[in-house]
Image (cartoon, grey):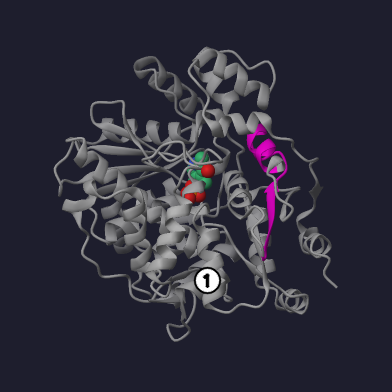
Amino acid sequence: MDYRSTRGSIKNTLNSSAAIIQGLAPDGGLFVPVNFPKVHMPVEKLSKLSYQDLAKMVIGWFFNDFSDNQISTAVDSAYSDQWDQAAIAPLSDQHANNYYLELFHGPTLAFKDIALQLLPRMMTRAVQINKVDKDIIILTATSGDTGTASMCGFSNQSGSSVIVFYPHGGVSPVQLKQMLGQNGANLNAISIEGNFDDAQTQVKKIFNDDQFKDKLAANGYQFSSANSMNIGRLVPQIVYYLSAYGQLVKQGKITAGDKVNFTVPTGNFGDILAGYYAKELGLPINKLICASDENNVLTDFFNTGTYDKKRPFDVTNSPAMDILVSSNLERLLFDLVDGDSNTVAQWMDLLEQTGQYSINKNQLKMLQKNFVAGYATQEQVESEIKRVYDRDSYVIDPHTAVASYVTKQYQSNNDDQTPTIIVSTASPYKFPETVYHAITGRHVTEKGLPAIQELHNKLGGTLTPGVQAILNNQPRPEQTIQPRQMEDTISSIMNLR
Ligand SMILES: *Cc1c(COP(=O)(O)O)cnc(C)c1O
C-alpha cells in the first residue's frame, strides 16, 4: 500500500514504513493511502477476536510492507502487561443505551497510549526495512497527553530521541508532573510562551526547514513525528472502534450488523478520524458525534461549512481539546473532494493566510451524513461529571464529560435510539482538580499530586498502577522558551554543529 500527501501529486508516493518515518509530507500535507484498503470487515467475527488479533488485522491492512511477523511481535509487546486491563479498551455500560469505551488503562492514563505504545515499535522496524542510517529525533507538539505518552513509548529506545514542546501553563498540573517525570536519557520536554497552536505551527515549520534538515543530516539525525499527523499514530486508533463494537455484540447489547454511534471528544481530529476510517472499512456506524469544548471551531464547521479559527483561544478544563487548528481534518477534506489535493492545498493556504475557508453546500451535506457536532462549556463539563457520578457512581474525566454532555444534548434534540458509545479518553485522576470540584463543590487544598490523593480519599477504591506511578515520580525542573527559539533549543539539546 502506497501513501501520498493530502497536498501533493498522486505521483509522489512512498510505502507505509517510509511514511511512518517521515511523519509529515515535505509539502506540509499529511500522508494518506493512495487507495483506501478495500477489505471485508468481519462484522460477525469481531466479538470473537482479542484486541491484539484485531490490531494485527487492521495494521496488516494499512501497513503491508511490514512482515506479518514484524506486525505480530510489535502488537504483542505494545498491548501486554503495561495495561491494567486485559481487554486493553474495556467497555463500561453505565446507562440504558450509552456505553463508555475506556481508553485510559495504559501507562500514562490517556488514550494516546493506544497508539504510542505501538508507534515506537513500528518505527524501529520501519528503520530496519528502510535501512535508515540516521538516528531519529521525534519532534512533537503536545497539548499534554501526547508528550507524556510519546516519552513513555520511546523511553530509552536506542537510535531515537524525543523532544516535546508544550504550552507553558496550558497543560494540567498532573500532565506537567508526568511529562517532567518520565525516565529516560533520550527524553526532553520544554515549554513555550504560547498556546498549543503556536507550538504545532512552529513544529510544522521546523519540519519543513530544509536548511535545518541538512544540518541534522550532517550530524547523523533526521526528524520524525509522534503527533497524530503521523499515519503510524492514526491507524492503531481504528482498532478500538472494532473492539468496542465486538464487545457490544458479545455482551448481547446489539446483534452483529446493527448500527452504533460514537461520540468522540475532539481536539486535533485524530481520534474521530480513526472512527471515520473504521466506518469506511465497513464497521456499521450510524453517526460520529464530534464533541468540542469552548474552542468550538469544529462545531461551527460541521454546522455551517465554514472553518474559522479567528476567535479567542480559551484555556479550559479539558486542555487536550484546546485547539483551534485541527490538523487531521485535512485528511477528511481530502476524502471529501475525492483526493483532489489542489483543493485541499488551497483551503489550507486560505486557513493560514486569512484564518478561514469554506466548503460548499453540497460538500457540507455529504459531511453531515456521517458527522454531527456539538460542544460543552466548562460549567456543563462539571455538571455532567456530577450528574454521571450521582446517578451511576461512575467517575469520568473532563474530556469524557464533554462527549457525555454532547451525547445527552444530541439525544434530547434528535430522535435517535441508536446505541451510543462515548469514547473515554482519560482517567479522572489525570484531572483531579476539576473532577473533585465537580463532585464535591469544593476546591482541592493543593493542585497536582496532592489533589490525586484528595480525590482518591473522596472516591475510595484502589489506585491503578499508572496512578501510583505518577505519585512516585521525580519531576525535572521546567524550562520555558519563546517559540522562535525552538530550533536553537533543538540544536543545543542534540549538540548539533
Ligand atoms: C488528545 C486527547 C483528546 C483529543 O484527541 P484528538 O485525536 O486530538 O482529537 C481528547 N481527550 C484527551 C484526554 C486527549 O489526550
Q: Decide: is 33 above or below 438.
A: below
Q: Which secondary structure, mark 1?
A: helix
| Circle 1 Cα neighbour tier, 10 Å, few/some/many (<14 / 14–19 / ≥20) | many
Residue designated by label 1: 126
Where in the figure is residue 231, as x and y percent of width and height?
47, 64
Where in the figure is residue 196, as x and y percent of width and height?
63, 49
**Residue positioned 44% across, 49% down in the render:** 79
| Quadrant of the rendered image containing residue 478 | top right
Depth order, front residue of 297/28: 28
Asked if the stretch drawn in magenta spans residue 388, the answer is no
| Quadrant of the rendered image containing residue 437 | top right
Where in the figure is residue 10, as x and y percent of width and height?
42, 82
Q: Decide: is 347 above or below 442.
A: below
**Residue positioned 59% across, 63% down in the render:** 225
**Residue positioned 43% across, 56% down in the render:** 75
- Please provide the residue range marked out in magenta: 159-179
Mark 1 residue CB less than 8 A from any atom of ligand 1: no
Residue type at mark 1 is Ala
Does residue 40 appear in this view? yes
Where in the figure is residue 349, as x and y percent of width and height?
55, 69
Asked if the stretch drawn in magenta spans residue 166, the answer is yes
Does residue 321 appear in this view? no
Depth order, front residue of 123/385: 123
Determine whether, in the image, residue 172 is placed left or right of residue 492: left
Depth order, front residue of 496/97: 496
